[in-house]
Image (cartoon, helix red, strand yellow):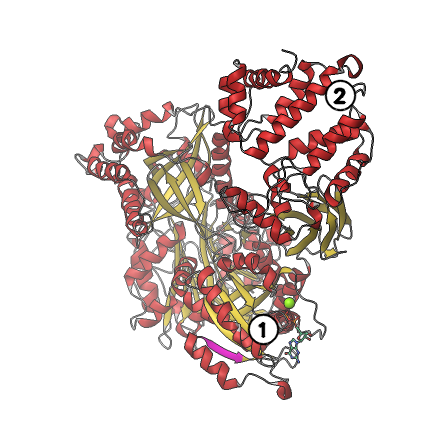
Amino acid sequence: MDQSVAIQETLEREENCKIAVQCDVLFDDIAESRLLGLVESAEEHAIFIYTHRRMAITADDVSLEDVIPICLDFAVVEVSSPEELAVVGGDTRVRVSYQEEELELRLPFGSHSRLFLGEVNRAWSDVCKSPAQVPKFEWINKYHKGTRGQGVVKQALTPLSTTLNKLSQHRKTEKSSDKKGTSEREKGSNSGTQKSRLPSSPESQGISSREDRDDLVRSSSHTPSNKAQILAMPQFGLRDNLIRCELLKNEDLYTYLEDFSFFLGTYNVNGQPPKESLSPWLSHTPNPPDMYCVGFQELDLSKEAFFFNDTPKEMEWTKAVTEALHPDAKYALVKLVRLVGIMLIFYVKKEHAEFISDVEAETVGTGIMGRMGNKGAVAIRFRFHNSDICVVNSHLAAHIEEYERRNQDYKDICSRLQFRPLDFTQPPLTIMKHDVILWIGDLNYRISDLDADNVKELISKKEFETLHSYDQLKRQIDEEAVFVGFVEGEIDFQPTYKYDTGSDLWDTSEKCRVPAWCDRILWRGKNIKQQHYQSHMALKTSDHKPVSSLLVAGIKRINTEAYKKTFEEIVRNIDKMENECIPSVTLAKQEFHFKDVKYMQHQAATLSLFNDGQVPCQFEFIQKPNESTYCKPWLTANPPKGFIAQGGSVEIELEVFVNRSTAPDLNSGKEQIEDILVLHLERGKDYFIPVTGNYLPSCYGTSIHSLCHMREPIQDMPQETLRKLVEMSVKENAANTEKPLDIPKELWMMVDHLFRNAIKQEDIFQQPGLRSEFADIRDCLDTGMPDSLPGSNHSVAEALLLFLDALPEPVVPFSFYQQCLESCSNASQCEKTISMLPQCHQNVFNYLAAFLRELLKNSAVNRLDVNILATIFASLLLRSPTKQDLAEKRKTQEFFQHFLTQGST
Amino acid sequence: MAKQYDVLFRLLLLGDSGVGKTCLLCRFTDNEFHPSHISTIGVDFKMKTLVIDGIKVRIQIWDTAGQERYQTITKQYYRRAQGIFLVYDITSERSFQHIMKWASDVDEYAPDKVQKILVGNKSDEVDKRQVATEQGVKLAKAYGMDFFETSAFTNHNITETFTRLAEQVLAANKKDLDLLRMSINDEINLAALEEEEGLLCDGAAGDQGKGCWC
Ligand SMILES: Nc1nc2c(ncn2[C@@H]2O[C@H](COP(=O)(O)OP(=O)(O)O)[C@@H](O)[C@H]2O)c(=O)[nH]1
Ligand SMILES: [Mg+2]
């Protein structure tokens, strides 16, 4: 039954209850049933929490208790996540939190609950998608007021917020030890809310107190991201299903049949209370039956029973039945179900009780409006050993001519009566899905085509067979219009309807009904034999006589050993399957070594992944802890993530490139070409891929200071010395035995080369060089001291610029940058600033400026001017420690221009 | 038959490279033994279902790379484990000495509640034994762990070892589990019925009847 209908009746027209679910709210040790509705209005959502009477059908059955708006502060989290400790097949427990409140819910196991949570989650993620659009929830206000007595909602019961609060308080104390940092302010607001929530008057509890609290707590609301947890569908439901399917398929391997006796009784008591012992009906068998399924109709004909489904007769008749069960055995009442006057009680012999499981009961009304309970059926299903059994007690439509209506009632019962499925991935369980179906009741089929006298005459002659051929039920079954597949035993007793109450006399009222076999017992299923089928004339309480039957049914019992073996085999196979389905790849190469990595020299290797698993897989390089990227900055993997079809492969380029930001630490030996990539397969293994290499240090990316201390090419220097030089430059005053060079020899080589060869070179510093020639120049500088450098003038010029660019500390050190900007308009100030630089930096600066002035002397040929050179060199010599804006850039150029024009003025 | 529900645990195999972690796992899940040693480079896992006390326990067993160079990375997997096998090779004194180091890493990185078990593998290699059984027993006692000598080669004590750790993890998480089991068990309260001598009291009938509405 869709309970959202009941909720909808309490709402305004523009509000829509999308889905409702019944659940338990869990407090410290108790659970209370509530009805939750997801209500939408103007694209805003809220969860409405109702207390309710049984299954809610109309607005009268529910009463609003609380409203939780789905806003950014809202979160719903599954309590046991598959990461931790997951239990499948159980109910779903979720924690709903809104601002400072938390509420723990237990939703019944099943797809409906999943659907509900899915909808809630969707509503919430919609809110998160457009955080700018803050929902107002104005439409909820009227409900808040309503609970204060305006009558929108009839009564405000104990407000949930009180209990909510209790729960969250409880949590707080639990957490407080590990949450020491909680601010005082937050604590303060809590105690404040606590006070405001103390009930001042019964009506003002609940939502009104929440309003007070909102103002206090709002400021400490959470950011959505830390609550952004997704309700994941547990994937392992599938697994249980597989096991169940396999077990079912192999049932013959581990079950055997054993007979058990079912006593079935049906009695239309015409609204009478029990007046006589029921023993003649219920305990006339020589041996005690294993089960009792006893059905009544017209238990109570009063208005109260009809409208409120409440009757004292339930207890009276149950007691009468209980007292009349077979005296030679002890019975346990397993289940009782009643719909108005239709009641079914199920007892089991004590020693069988432990083999009964999955007991469910349901009712279906087929009376007035198609749903009232004056006619209809009640049913109990259960599993006994390994057989699924369903017992139905029905009271079908009355009146002799209404047999088609009775057929219709039967069909309605079969389609509308649905039990909760044992597993949410499966559709609801219907009557027909059971191994054994026992159907009893006042089916109300009559005798056609004969008048009362004919009937009575046949009865007196005990020609029941002849009479039976006029029976509507027999005829309808023969025509396959009803009870298809059911069997009824031979009727060897006189009709059970209608007698003058208290006698065995046929109806003497003016209606003078034709006698009929209204009360019947049928069954469907294999291996069932009927031991008896009879009426009980001795009972005279009603205008019907009770009927009983003893059926002996072959029930599937489990051979524990065989079951265990089968089960283990199945589980083993599924484990195997599952392990085979874990994504897996093979790596063509396990480890990568990059030999002789050089500054600005790209190297690449190919990592081939072959998907050797049974499933497609998703791969990604993942970050190691405490690292912000999946690999070191000099390394890239391309692509860093992707998808490989089963049997397919992917080539990933691993690229090493040392640039000016990674070079300094590699030059000094502080860093190595060494990394471990973690290649992760989604839902699968992780592979560790070591990447190693040797780096050849370069003057590129080495400090002026260090270079001034190297009389040999950098690659001839011992690693140890390189490291020491870096340390030394940090503590400037380190005692130094050898006098350093004035300027780095590499710089001198490039500048001297240009001075000698390129002073008249057209477009020098304007035209780019060749990359291959740069590599040669770099190698030359790093390995030896030749008389001249290789490559064209343009290439050498570019190599010089790259050199300046790669300096970890620019020629004008970062710490002097600000001072330079300030003095840029004043030439002497500028010179003064430069005179303060560390000696080697000052030397380099002056050396470069002098060289550039020489170049400018030949500007007619090389087409250079002050502006061009200032633009190029200022940006290399005066680098900002942070980001440089245009105004600053101009100032650096202005600063440097003073030095280019020095000679001419 | 009881209702179907699963418990999922994560167990981790730790120990020096070559002690036989991968072989133990292979033996346990697939009942196979591969004599060649292909060292695990990364983290691999397999699933296995056990039935303990009628509960279906699914365990996910993680096999890690034992080499020193990967340890900073593998340590990050510890905190997701509920149970840990500390494995050494009885033919390698060195691997036994290293158990101390492994155990201290576990203390540092694994959750407090983690269950541990000490495993001396290759018990079939009688002639090459370097670590006496008593040494294992003593160490396990010092750590308060259970101890098994196993052989992935002969399939000796394999199921026992894995089952024991799973049992311990189950016991350590029993409180949470019982809660879950209770919430699942909506079957008829047969126990209560059985206890009562006057089985058929009237009050029970009324209560039972309401059951059908929920
Ligand atoms: N004799 C013997 N050899 C074993 C046993 N278990 C593993 N081995 C061998 O030890 C080597 C290393 O095993 P492996 O499982 O790869 O070690 P892991 O590095 O710890 O994963 C392999 O050559 C195996 O054949 C065992 O129980 N007995
Ligand atoms: Mg291994």
The image shows residue A881 at horizontal and vertical percentages of: 53, 29
State how far apart marks 2 and 1 are (Cα).
87 Å
Q: Is mark 2 within 8 Å of ligand 2?
A: no
A655 to A842, vertically: above or below: below
**Placement of A8 over or under A354, stated as above or below:** above
Q: Secondary structure at mark 2?
A: loop
Q: Position of residue A175 (x, y in %)?
A: 32, 50
Q: Nearer the viewer, residue A764 or B207?
A: A764
In the rendering, at what x and y percent does residue B54 appear?
49, 70
Quadrant in the picture for residue A827: top right
Give the residue type that dot 2 points to: Gln
Crowd class of label 1 (few under 14; some 14 to 19; many from 20; radius 10 Å): some
State which image quarter holds ligand 2.
Answer: bottom right
Q: Earlier in the sequence, mark 2 or mark 1?
A: 1
Q: Main secondary structure of the magenta part?
A: strand
- Going 62% across and 69% down the picture, which residue do you hit? B17
Q: Which is more toward the observer, A263 or A426?
A: A426
Q: Left or right: where does residue A203 sit relative to residue B165? A: left
Side of A6 where A577 appears, left or right: right
Q: Report if residue A471 is visible in the image.
A: no
Q: Residue at x 37, y 24 (%)?
A: A139
Q: Secondary structure at mark 1?
A: helix
* Chain at tag 2: A
On whether residue A835 falls in the magenta region, the answer is no
| Residue at the spot of label 1 | A563
Q: Amino acid at mark 1?
A: Tyr
Which residues lie in the magenta part?
Answer: B144-148
Locate residue A552, reporting x and y percent: 53, 71
Snapshot quadrant of residue B144: bottom left
Nearer the observer: mark 2 or 1; the answer is 2
Give the numbered dot on residue A766: 2
Label 2 crowding class (10 Å Cα cut-off): few <14, some 14-19, many 20+? some
